[in-house]
Image (cartoon, helix red, strand yellow):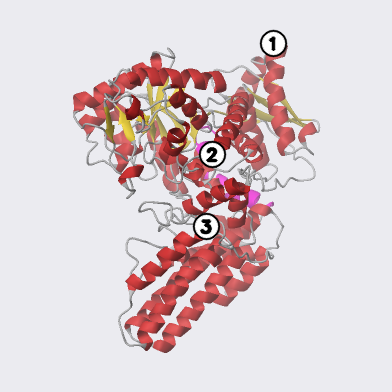
Amino acid sequence: MRRLIILSCCLCVLMVQGKNTKLSEVSIARAMTERLIPAQSANIVYKQIVTDVDSFLIESSGDKVCISGNNANSMAMGLNYYLQNYCLTTVSWFACDPIDMPSHLPRVESPVGARAKVKARFFLNYCTYGYTMPFWNWTEWERFIDWMALNGVNMPLAITGQESIWYNVWKKLGLKDDEIRNYFTGPAHLPWHRMSNIDGWQGPLPKSWLENQKNLQKRIVERERELGMTPVLPAFAGHIPGALRRLYPDLKATDVSRWAGFEKKYSCTFLNPLDPLFPKIQKAYLQEQTRLYGTDHIYGVDPFNEVDPPTWKEDSLSIISRMIYESLTSVDKEARWLQMGWLFHYDAAHWTQPRVKALLRGVPQDKLIMLDYFCDANEVWKKTESFYGQPFIWCYLGNFGGNIHLNADFDGLSSKIKNTFSQDSTGNFFGIGSTLEGFDVNQCAFEFVLGKAWNLPVSDDEWILRLADRRYGEVNAQVRDARSLLRWHAPEGDCSAVTQNPVLKSQNFTFMKEKSCMLELQALRKLLSVPNTGRDAYVFDVVNLGRDLLGWKFREARDRLIDAYEAKNLKDAERYAGLMRDLLCDVDALLACHSTFSLESWIEKARKFGTTSDEADYYEENARTLITVWGGSLLDYARRDWCGLVSTYYAPRWENFMNEIISAIKENRQYDGGKVGEQNKTLNWNFIKPSTPVHYSPKQDGVKLCKQLIKKYFGDE
């Protein structure tokens, strides 16, 4: 309490006197509030303060709630703290999800506030632009940017719209229209084109896409800057169209290693930074980008993501990074380079410490910001002397491919972040962030991590209980118990068995253990035992837990089917095949109960980008491809438990599998995996065609249906 009183006094003393500055930040925060909660916005007032670090303070004054902050970003963080802890409200990062508010704003009996513990709060991943955002319009982006502000994000990756700039750059260098647009991939695969992994896959990119994304990016960066964020824009990392060799036959360029099983024709070309054309391309790109989108002097540059550099010699790696950096500063003297640290985790065998050090030390100290990309599993900063003097951002990845992991290891995350604060003796710990690959996951885990960037006056135990309150809409002991149970349930396995490519043996897939399943079941039963408040977040949690448990039951039935095949027991095989069919049908019906789990929505968003029916078909095919066959060797990498996808993609594959097992038993022969593989390969590639119909389950009451299904498959408590 004494700390809060002191903070309150300091903030009052430091109240801004300049009217224009105050109104600017205040008006931005007010506009955000009117977008999110228009009915209550008049009773929330803002004041701007001056502090040495980002800070907010919340207090009541009469019937008003007053939120003070040094900028709109801090004010937004204060608003979110108030919404979560006093209004018991969750603001979703999805624009289609409602924001449930109480009829009257609760009072803040004693002032409460917080200060940022780190300067940078980073968010996003190149992959997110494929697995979640490729077909977003301004409606989706506007809500998401507000969500980032509410969670204190001030350094978002902002890579939309770069293809329109690259088109102009390559055109000026002499390439033809078809050479450029065939160099680009389809929209959903652009993140991996941008990371120099693949060229041309599902191209050519329509010209209308370039214009659309250019205009969208202008709005994105403008709003992000309004809300106190520093957008991280891309820069040239060396990736060029192979066709450039036609015009410059003496280029110092190499074909990078083939990536993820793609044919050689889809491989990328890397221009050596020592080539005199390199700084010219960098200058042309940055000048055009700055003209259109402005600059905040931080540029994302990732030359060797999951591909080999042209050499592994340490001195050469140092020269490469130095030349890339100098190409930036020759255009922008204030330039800082932001680099993913994923490559050091992904290919640790080649990226030895001397090589890592050589690459990083090629850039002046403090001019290269490293994202420690996967700290939930591997904290690279601990193995590299805190990235050899370069500032780093501790990042939580949380999921791959946007797969729907149900939960997170809250205590493990909290402990690791706490240890980073205490153990980094270099002073290089620059920020906290998240590099999630996709959104259809556990939003609260990412909010938890971002909250660790502030000295919020709430313990981890309290945070979990208040999370339960705001998901349900009121304080309830059973709901709190359910959320506390899930707190100890760290994510296990790769996916639901429903979305697995059918094979007789599970190969490299791992699944939730029975102990965790029983923990989830116990938590879900508690959620189902309370009255349905109608809160959208509560319905989502029920459906999410339900689909995970039914997926576990499906795996169990599949295992029994395989046991029956090995025992040549036809009766059991037919019984378990029937159970699998029932589960597939019921999973699809349950998923239809919340908009998050919808193939229909994914396809509709993609088609809306088409300016012609042919373009709409093109975007739909690209959208279908990413979440199914993907390309190369990445089949099912972005698998989804989605209504419509289960019934029309996964279920037919399992039907082929089940039919072959039963036929093999009847005919007293070996299961023919090659036959099933060919059948499903044809099915997979046919599915991506827009002419393939998608069948949807009728929507029902998700809580009521989940109760019925849990009783059906798990019995009474």
Marks 3 and 2, the one that precedes in the sequence: 2
Give the residue type at disc 2: Pro
Is the stretch drawn in magenta largely helix, strand or loop?
A: helix
Is residue 136 or residue 32 the one in the foreground? Answer: 136
Q: Which residues are magenta?
A: 450-474
Is residue 621 or residue 641 the one in the foreground? Answer: 621
Question: Residue 368: x and y, percent?
Answer: 37, 23
Q: Which residue is mark 1?
A: 18
Give the residue type at disc 1: Gly
The numbered disc on residue 206 is 2
Q: At numbered mark 3, what does the secondary structure look like: helix, strand or loop?
A: loop
Say which quadrant the N terminus sits in: top right
Q: At numbered mark 1, what does the secondary structure look like: helix, strand or loop?
A: loop
Question: Residue 414: x and y, percent?
Answer: 45, 42
Say if the magenta span includes residue 317.
no
Marks 2 and 1, the one that precedes in the sequence: 1
Say if the magenta span includes residue 452.
yes
Q: Which residue is mark 3?
A: 689
Location of residue 317 (image quadrant): top left
Is residue 688 or residue 715 the one in the foreground? Answer: 688
Vertical placement of 638 versus 612: above or below?
below
Give the residue type at disc 3: Lys
Vertical placement of 482 versus 47: above or below?
below
Task: Point out the frontmost of discs 2 and 1.
Answer: 2
